[in-house]
Amino acid sequence: MPTGLTARPVEEADADRILELFNARSRRLFGEDQSAAQDVEQWMQSPCFELHVDSRLLLDSDGRAAAVARVENPGEPYAVFGSAVSTHPMYERRPELWNSLYAWCDERIAELVPLAAPDIRVAARGLAYAEDEPRRAALGRAGFQLLRVQNRMRVDFSNPIAPPEWPDGITVRTTDPAVELDPLIRVYTEAWSDHWGYIERPHHEVVASAKRQIQRDGKFHDPSLWFVAVEDGEIVGVCLCLSHVNRDTTRGYVNGLGVRPLWRKRGIGSALLQHALCEFQSRGYAAVELDMDSRNLTGALHLYERAGMRVIRQLMRYEKVVRPGVDLATRQLST
C-alpha cells in the first residue's frame, strides 16, 4: 500500500470522485474534459464486471481519488483481460502507486484465467497515450510490452469534400439498427475478422454490446449517420458514424468502417468514407475523427490519408502473456 493512501473497492457513491480523476488527467494531457457522468456509469456497469472484486480505489487524506484500477473482462472466450489504471496528476510521479495497482490487476486476472479453455493463450493488455509518460513507464515496470500503435486521425473541413465515386452496381443507403442490427453486426464482424488482433466472440454478445452502446449514446445516437453499401440488395460494407466526439457536436466520428473481404479492392471503402465526410460537412460539422491501427493489414491508413485525414494523437497498446497456449487472435489477412 502506497504511504498516506487508503485502498478499497470502488462503490457507486464514488462516481463523482472518479469522474474528476479521469477529467483531471485528460485536462493535463489534452487540455479538455473527455469524460461525462454517463461514461463513469458505463465504467461501473459493464457486463462481466463486479465493482467489489474488479476495481480498486486509492484515496488520499482529503478523500480525493488518487488512483483507480479496474480489470476489464470482455467475456468469452476469455483470451484477453484489460489492466486499466488511472492516477490523478497530483500522484502520477509516485511509481509505488502505479506498481501496487498493476500488481493488484495481475492478482485479479490470475483468478479469472480458469474461465478460459485450458489450451488457449491468455493475455493482459494495457493502454497509454503517447504523451502519458508515467503510465507508459509503469506498464514497462509491470512487464508489459508495446504491441501496436493506434492512430487518432482527423480531417478539418477547410475545403469542400469531394463527392464519392461509387463502383458499378454499388448503392448507398442509411440503416436503422432497430430493424437491421443483427445483419449489420454479421457484416461488420465479417469485415473485421481478418484484421490484426481480432478475437471472435459469440454473436449474441456482440449484438448485446452494440445495443448497450446505442442506449448509452442516448440523444446523440443518430441512425441517419449509419451508412451501408449495397449490391443486388446485399449489404457489402458499412460506415457507422457517431454525431459527436466526447459529446462535442462540432466534430463527427467514424466509429466503424469495413468492407466484406470478397468486395474489397473495388473502392467501396473509400466511397463510403467520402460519403460520410460529405454528409458531415453538409450538416455544418467542423471536423471528423476516427481511430485506426497504424499497421492495419488492409492498408486503411492510405485510404484515410487520401481523404485528407492526418494523425493527431497516438494510443499505445501493451500486452503481456499471462498463460501460453493457442493464440486465438488474427495475425495476418485471410487468404
Image: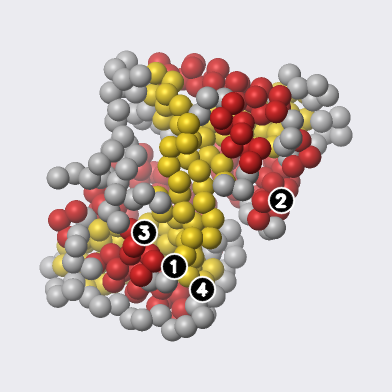
Check whether the beta carbons of the residues at disc 1 and disc 2 lie within 8 A of each other.
Answer: no
In this picture, residue 99 sits left or right of residue 80: right
- Label 3: which secondary element: helix
For badge 3, the amino acid type reads: Leu
For badge 1, the amino acid type reads: Met
- For marks 1 and 2, give the CA distance: 25 Å
- For marks 4 and 2, give the CA distance: 24 Å
- Work out whether residue 33 can be spotted: no
**Residue 181 x %, y %:** 32, 54
**Residue 227 x %, y %:** 33, 67
For badge 4, the amino acid type reads: Asp
**Residue 326 x %, y %:** 28, 23
Q: Which residue matches tag 3? A: 301
Q: Which residue matches tag 1? A: 309
Q: How many marks?
A: 4
User: Can you tell which mark lies on residue 156?
Assistant: 4
Q: Quadrant of residue 239?
A: bottom left
- Work out whether residue 209 can be spotted: yes
Q: Which residue matches tag 2? A: 28
Residue drawn at (33%, 81%), measured in percent from left and top? Answer: 163
| Circle nearer the N terminus (4, 2) | 2
- For marks 3 and 4, give the CA distance: 17 Å
- For marks 2 and 3, give the CA distance: 29 Å
